[in-house]
Amino acid sequence: MHKNSLASGHVTAAEMRHVLAGFPTGLVLVAAEVEGNVVGLSANSFTTVSLDPPLVSISFAHSSTSWPILRRATRWGVSVLGEQQAHVLQELRRPAHERFNRLDMQVQSGAAFAAGALAKLTVELDTEIEAGDHTLTLLRVFELHRDTEQHPLIFFGSGTHRLAR
């Protein structure tokens, strides 16, 4: 933080983004089939909330055009991206109607998953909490699987990285 924001108690969005870029996170793809089309987006706000009941959370920006469509789905797929899936992020930067044209997606009971994901969770929306310019969602987990042979794709310093081994 700059000294000015410490003295004034005001933190700008740019300062917040800069400082939190120093906190490494994993990356997920959240997707579902809605009206015959796969819709979804990437997120790095994914986190565990509770083991009993099994809950996770993701925050969605109010400015997102995909979030209102995804919200209509009964079940969502959360694909934790592995270090070999940086190409998935590149595709997710495309316009919403083109994002899934070149991705190998698997749809199960409406939840959509990236093929080869490190982990897959089938979730349903449990609770929504308005939080500033985002909506924090609590998601109930119904099914999950992890490929223990893979390593995660990490988001740090506004870019993707692999874990050093």
Image (cartoon, rainbow, N blue to C red):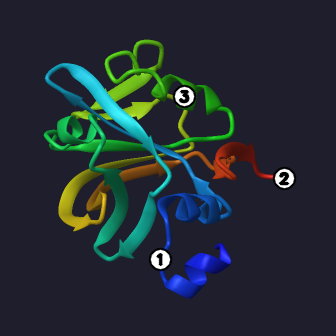
Residue toward you, 1 or 110: 1
**Alpha carbon of mark 1 to alpha carbon of mark 3: how far?**
36 Å
Which of pointers 1 and 3 indicates the residue nearer the eye? 1
Say whether residue 153 is left or right of residue 103. right
Q: Position of residue 12 (x, y in %)?
A: 49, 65
Could you say where residue 37 lies in the image, as x and y percent from the top left? 24, 20
**In what element is the residue under mark 1?**
loop
Q: Residue at x 47, y 13 (%)?
A: 102
Quickly name the residue at label 2. 164
Image: 156 above or below 92: below
User: Mark 1–mark 2 contact, CB under 8 Å?
Assistant: no
**Would residue 150 be seen by someone viewing this image from the given angle?**
no
What residue sits right under mark 3 in the picture?
88
Q: Nearer the viewer, mark 1 or mark 2?
A: 1
Q: Is residue 133 visible?
A: yes
Q: Which residue is mark 1?
A: 10
Residue 41 point in image, percent of width and height = 39, 37
